[in-house]
Amino acid sequence: MSRITAPPRTLRLYGDLERPGDLTVAQLRRWPAQRAEVVFDCATNGAQRHVFTGPLLRDVATEAHPTFDVRRRKDRSRFLIAVFGGDGHRSVLSWPEIDAEFGNSPVLLATTLDGRPLDADGSQLVVPGDACGARYVSAITSIWVGAYLPPDR
C-alpha cells in the first residue's frame, strides 16, 4: 500500500517587493538559523515556554528586495509587514521593528518548535520580546510587505 503524502506547506511572500515568491519550510532553512528561547502568555493555554529555530524575518524579507530606498531611513520607516496564519489569525509589524538600524528585533520565521520540524505544519512567526503570544502566528500562509498609505490618498 502506498502512502499519500501531503504537499509541503508554503507561504506566499508578496507586496511591494521586486522578488515575491512562495517558500516552503525547507526553503526557509537556506538562511542562517537563529535560536529563540521564549516565554509568553497565551490567552487560551496560559504560560508557554518554547524553543524555536529559524531565519530572521528581516533576512527573508530583505532578500525579496522591498521597493523602499535602503539609504533613506524615512522611506524604510513607512513599510509594514502583515503575517497571515492558516487559522485566520494575522499580525502586523512595522519594518523599523526588525530593521537593524531601528528596533533590531530578532523576529523569526520558525522552522522548528521544541526541536520538532514544522514542515508539515508550516512556519510560525515568533516575536521573542512579546510578553503575550498574540503576535505569534502559526501555519503562516502569507506575508505581505508594503508601504503604508493613508486612506485619504
Image: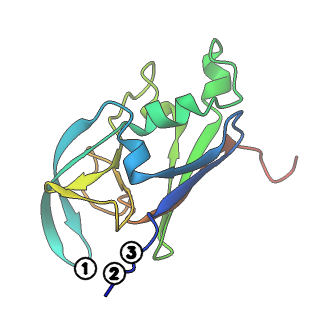
Q: Position of residue 32 (x, y in %)?
A: 32, 30
Alpha carbon distance from label 3 to label 2 = 6 Å
Q: Quadrant of residue 64?
A: top right
Mark 1 neighbour density, 10 Å: few (under 14) some (14–19) many (20 or more): few
Residue 61 located left or right of residue 137: right
| Secondary structure of residue under mark 3 | loop
Alpha carbon distance from label 1 to label 3 = 31 Å
Depth check, mark 1 against mark 2: the one in front is 2
Q: Is 114 above or below relative to 57? A: below
Residue that appears at 32% across and 48% down: 127
Mark 3 neighbour density, 10 Å: few (under 14) some (14–19) many (20 or more): few
**Which of 95/21 is in front?**
21
Q: Position of residue 82 (x, y in %)?
A: 56, 53
Query: Which amino acid is tagged 2?
Result: Arg
| Secondary structure of residue under mark 2 | loop
Query: Which amino acid is tagged 3?
Result: Thr
Query: Which amino acid is tagged 1?
Result: Thr
| Label at residue 82 | none
Q: Position of residue 54 (x, y in %)?
A: 30, 43
Residue that appears at 63% across and 11% down: 71
Residue that appears at 65% across and 22% down: 74
Residue under pointer 3? 5
Do callouts 3 and 2 mark residues in contact (Cβ within 8 Å)? Answer: yes
**Which of 117/126 is in front?**
117
Alpha carbon distance from label 1 to label 2 = 35 Å
**Which of 103/82 is in front?**
82
Q: Position of residue 140 (x, y in %)?
A: 46, 61
Residue under pointer 1? 44
Q: Quadrant of residue 138?
A: bottom left
Residue under pointer 2? 3
